[in-house]
Amino acid sequence: MTLRRRDEKRSFSERLHVLKSSLDPKSDKYGLKTFYESVNAVADIVFVHGITGHREHTWATGERGARPWPESLLPAKVPYSRILSFGYDAAVIGWRTRISSNRIGDHAKNLVAALASHRDADNSSNRPIIFVCHSLGGLVCKDALWCSKTSPENHLQRILNCTLGILFLGTPHSGTGLAKVAERLIQLVSNPATRTNLRILEVLCRDSEVLARIQDDFHSLLRCRDNEGFPPIEITCFYEELPLPGIGEVVPKHSAILPGYPAIGIHSDHRDIARFATEDEPGFISILGELQRWMKEIQLGQYRAGSPRSSRSKSLEGKNMFNANAHMRSHNSNNYGGITIHGDVVESNVVNGGMTIHGGLRFGN
């Protein structure tokens, strides 16, 4: 199949018109939008766009009437899910309009608060979460999870505790040299009628203190997960293989990947890495494969959101607590000298509300 490069025949003025249109600060661009929801949803898949992005347009091709692929292609492939998209003001230039002066941290806090409120409203606050993030959206997501971890509010902490995995699409984990180029371009097109927000570009610079802080906090968060007894967060990074027409390479491979985690290339530029028209495009297939693998873990019960585990001791559990399905009886065998436990077993520090078992344990059928 031959894939036509999107926007390749547009003139500079036509592209500028599209950019201006995308920066129109309409209220329906922001917050959470539901693309799809199953009555039997077992996970929330949350999409987060990048700089100058849009909660719908970022995920749709440039064709007239095109729908976002998380709405048009994904539901049939991951039917037992709820698919959400988060929008925030990531504009850097506004023509005769007001634009936000928010920093990355502000958008991160808004993401956590919006998700927590949305999930609390329909009693789905313990449902596993998978994030799919494009470009700057990955940095917003990473900072959002740190905000969740450090929050004193239980409902906000739950966002991190329920996070199963993150797909990063062209996220500049170590910055991009195009940030300074973008600043110069903004200065060239600026006039008394324009409004700019250079703060949001600061995080993209390779020597950015904010970027370094987000990276350090995120790695600390990942290390703490194991120490606190929570399952590790699954991570897969996708990087662009083609330059953006008229601009060049936006996020180089070395910046788009995280050492120690899977990295997959998509034969597209920085924008098209997040846009698909059909389900047989290689990039869509690669992303879908990761999502389906993680969804399978949830459906098979291999992942339990918000449940800390510890290898230091064992507890008895039928479903979510000790009950009649977990049967315990005495065992006098010289080989074990302890007890035999029947029923489902999960790791924990506490047994039946506070009694810790010491000594040998034999786990029966």
Image (cartoon, helix red, strand yellow):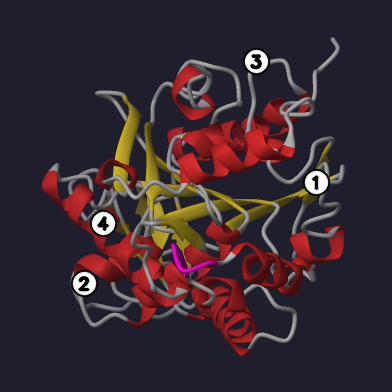
- Number of other residues with Cα within 10 Å of mark 2, as a class: few under 14, some 14 to 19, many 20 or more: few
Q: Residue furthest bottom?
A: 209
**The disc label shown at residue 240, or none:** 1
**3D distance between C-alphas at marks 2 and 1:** 38 Å
Q: Nearer the viewer, residue 26 or 344?
A: 26
- Residue under label 2: 154
As measured in the structure, the alpha-carbon distance from the residue carrying label 1 to the one carrying label 4 is: 30 Å
The residue that appears at 41% across and 49% down in the rendered structure is 129
Tell me which segment is drawn in magenta.
Answer: 191-196
Q: Which residue is mark 3?
A: 278
Front residue (pair 52, 111): 52
The residue under label 4 is 114
Name the mark nearer the viewer: 2 or 1: 1
Query: Which of marks 4 and 3 precedes in the sequence?
Result: 4
Spatial CA distance of label 2 from label 3 is 41 Å
Q: Is residue 100 visible?
A: yes
Q: Position of residue 83 (x, y in %)?
A: 39, 34
Q: Position of residue 114 (x, y in %)?
A: 26, 56
Q: Secondary structure at mark 4?
A: helix
